Amino acid sequence: MAGLRLGVNVDHVATVRNARGGLSPDPVRAALLAIEAGADGITAHLREDRRHIRDDDMRRLKASIAKPLNFEMAATEAMLDIALELHPHACCLVPEKRTERTTEGGLDVVNGFKDLKPFVAELVRVGIRVSMFIEPSPEALKASADLGAPVVELHTGAWCDAWARGDKPKAEYEFGRLRAAAVQTQSLGLECHAGHGLDYETARFIAALPQIVELNIGHFLIGEAIFVGLAESVKAMRMAMTEGRAAAERPV
């Protein structure tokens, strides 16, 4: 069974900084600390309204970290220009609405196929790995493969929300969708990532899906860091992921 990478999203370090203004806390410092604690890469979402991560943060992250930088972005010409200038390791195309508190679902790659095609093609052309943040549906997976993206990130938000509410039927249904989607990625030749709303418990659980090779987690880790420190929260997440994958590898 393949190893499982952890990408740490540092957006909400910038959220705290921006609430007061000034330079502290610094998301670049957080990224370096997360890597030292065991993160395999750093994710940051440069939103159109710059509500957390800012342009200078992206430049400093690219210049400062030795691990892969995953640039989450909306499929707009302005963001494409920034991505082409920055040239991060990867770009994850995500939906974006100014009215949302956080990303509310996967990118509509089926209805948006025609508009998304040139964005994916241009990023791939310059050697940036493209990931599509999508709902775990057969249609979205097929469209992502047809777009030429080598990676998909499955939106785990609906499952995590149902899990947190204790809605067992809904959680089982949503996890079934995630499991089926993860299996389908193999037949489509897609690398499978997952993220949104994950905590220690849900990360441990989803780590048992062997097709998933990367989890991207941010809000929970930054929240935990208030109580235990960022290094400890990252180490605890790595342990949860390792335990979940190891349990899946044990013979029944």
Image (cartoon, helix red, strand yellow):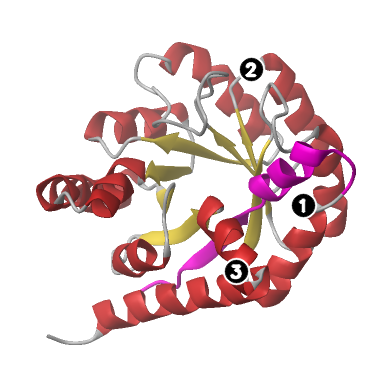
Left or right of 12: which side holds 148?
A: left
Picture disc at residue 76 = 2
Dot 3 falls on a residue whose secondary structure is helix
The quadrant in which the C terminus is found is: bottom left
Q: Of discs 3 and 1, which sits in the foreground? A: 3
Can you tell which mark lies on residue 227?
Answer: 3
Q: Is residue 36 above or below residue 71?
A: below
Question: Can the viewer see residue 55?
Answer: yes
Inter-mark Cα distance, 2 to 1: 24 Å
Tell me if 50 is positioned left or right of 121 in this view. right
Q: Is residue 118 left or right of residue 126?
A: left
Would you say the residues marked 2 and 3 are in contact, meaning their CB atoms lie under 8 Å apart? no
Type of the residue with mark 3: Phe
**Closer to the observer: label 2 or label 1?**
1
Select label 2 or label 3 by which is in front. 3
Image location of residue 138, percent across then percent down: 23, 35
The residue labelled by disc 1 is: 27
Badge 1 density bin: few <14, some 14–19, many ≥20, Cα 10 Å: many
Dot 1 amino acid type: Pro
Looking at marks 2 and 3 on the same chain, the residue that comes earlier in the sequence is marked by 2
Spatial CA distance of label 3 from label 1 is: 18 Å
Which residue occupies 54% across, 64% down?
6
Residue 36 in the image: state x and y as whole percent.
Answer: 72, 75
Q: Amino acid at mark 2?
A: Thr
The part of the chain drawn in magenta is 1-23
- Answer whether residue 3 is magenta in the image: yes
